[in-house]
Amino acid sequence: MRVLIVFLALLLSLPSFAQNEALGKNYYEKGEYEKALTIFKRLAAKNPHRTEYTVYTIKSYQQLEEFEEAEKLIQKKLETPRPLATFFVELGYNFALQEKDSLAHISYERAIREVQERPFNAYAVGRAFSDYSLLDYAVITYETAMELEPDRNYNPQLARIYGEQGKLDKMFEKYIDLILQNPSYRASAQRNFSYYINEDPNNEANAMLRKTLLKKIQQRPELLFNELLSWLFIQQKEFKKAFIQEKAIYKRSDEDLRGIVDLLRIAIEEEHYEDAREIAQFVIDKAPTSQIKLEGYQYLMNVGMKIASPNDYPTIEKQYLDLFDEFGKGPETLALQIDYYHFLAFMNGRSTEAIMELKKLAKEGINIYQEARVKMKLADILVFDEKFNEALIFYTQVQKKVKNDLLAQEARFKVARTSYFKGDFDWAQIQLDVLKKSASQLIANDAMQLALMISDNSLEDSTRTALKKFSRADLLTLQKKETDALTLLQDILTNHKGEKIEDEALLKSGQVYESLGQFEQAAAQYSKLIELYNEDILADDAHYRLAKLYEGPLAQTEKAKELYEQIIFNFADSIYFVDARRRYRMLRGDSIN
């Protein structure tokens, strides 16, 4: 009974300890060190075996510059029968804060001696050194333990530390060795490489990794080295070089085309269409089955459409028809057929024919997912043709057919967008509110953005006149009627000046000008948005788009750098923050060290 009472008392005290710990950490992070000290002293007294409480007590003393009190507490811990080796690191750091460097060094050396005597201490001691940025000592700690007991593996910690020290050659060597020993380390290694690698082939880290891998290929031909070189070239957007590595992998891996097909997808996403055409042709030529060959042709046709001018349309149509002659028009070519009808409607001005053929296709013996994709494309074309009510019917059918699929969420978003195009903003808003919690982050973000625009531009103007004009301009852009869209957007900027819609109209105008290759005009729109609405929600979009223009077609890298810097300092929560920081560092020519 007594044991039970003690157990229940301990159990009831756990939430209290957790709450006090959280409160203490909160005080510490806010710089209220006296309050933090009071809490952690009490916690440490009640839980002498919880090292974390003691360490926070020591840190609080140090922040209050009560170094003698901190030293007394550390010494007390070191006088116990089996002291933790990490307290020698704490003692050394306490001396270092007082600029007693020789005493600090003695304590650090004592911590390392503890590792020599008991190598299992290495992990905790090495981490303690790392926490205080004492990286040289951390390296000695891990290397000492591994030398004494080779079965211990502190290579992941060493690799990370080498990177922090700027010893890139050692970092890359260590990570590559780790992957060779255990392929599961690869994802983690590439994630760490990404902190140092960027798009610039002349960047120090890029050059170092390339040199390391080429040297290893000469020493021992391993597929891993080719795979990592391919990965590096993809980061540098050098798809021809990546293709060379993927072909080498293909020849040595039972002629498996998966890596090459993945590279093809990435090249298309990055709009390197000429490289993509070459890769697609390789897939076609080497395809072991008609299905893979067909997939290669589909990618090749997609690339052809991306770079085609109206003069090329007859050739593209003939190529599609030739493929249907070769592969037929059955379920196996369904994706190719959908692409063909997209081409007819969106590029070749034959939407009526495309709609008719897709309706027939939807009635053929295909599974529900294939039917859903056919009806999705059919509805897209009906929106393009401004047959909104019929499009809504097909989008709704897609939602019902594949309820638990992401395709259903995409269909719901398109229901909302179609309602927005036709001016039914209230119904669009209802659909968008549901989609804000979508499993797809992309759909959720798009839904949130459109919902915000509708609500923002409904408050001041109950008639939603400007919003109707804007939604019409949005549709005209979709229909590739850019000149008409710009006329309508200019009308908004002239007749609705100062209204909420103005920043949206400026951003949209910039995007349309960009699509027409009129980069100076696009830059003028983004600059105006920044000038008038630098505190508003679209300001980071304008900064980023303008920076990309200056970095790219307008070739004014100093201006690009300034804009990326503004995103870093003024828009820390922006979706562009990470890329802006990376591009800023690349333009500035940062050294990795």
Image (cartoon, rainbow, N blue to C red):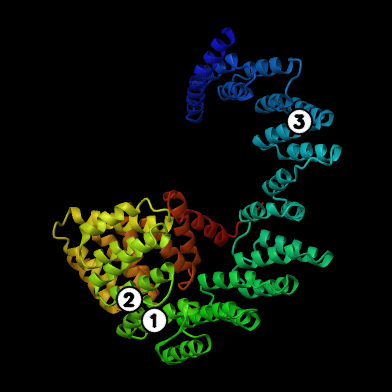
* Disc 1: CA contacts within 10 A as few (<14), some (14-19) or many (>=20): many
Q: How far apart are the two marked residues, 2 and 3, measured between alpha carbons?
A: 67 Å
The image quadrant of residue 125 is top right
Q: How far apart are the two marked residues, 1 and 3, measured between alpha carbons?
A: 67 Å
Q: Position of residue 94 (x, y in %)?
A: 67, 25
The image quadrant of residue 357 is bottom left
Q: Residue furthest front?
A: 365
Q: Is residue 5 above or below residue 111?
A: above
- Residue hosting label 2: 381
> Going 42% across and 59% down the picture, which residue do you hit?
405
Q: Amino acid at mark 1?
A: Tyr
- For numbered disc 3, what is the local secondary structure? helix
Q: Is residue 3 left or right of residue 542?
A: right
Q: Position of residue 80 (x, y in %)?
A: 73, 15
> Going 34% across and 75% down the picture, which residue do you hit?
378
Q: How far apart are the two marked residues, 1 and 2, measured between alpha carbons?
A: 9 Å
Q: Nearer the viewer, mark 1 or mark 3?
A: 1
Q: Residue furthest left?
A: 463
State the residue in front, 290 or 546: 290
Q: Residue furthest top?
A: 2
- Residue hosting label 3: 121
- Residue hosting label 1: 341
State the residue in front, 550 or 51: 51
Between discs 1 and 3, the one toward the N terminus: 3
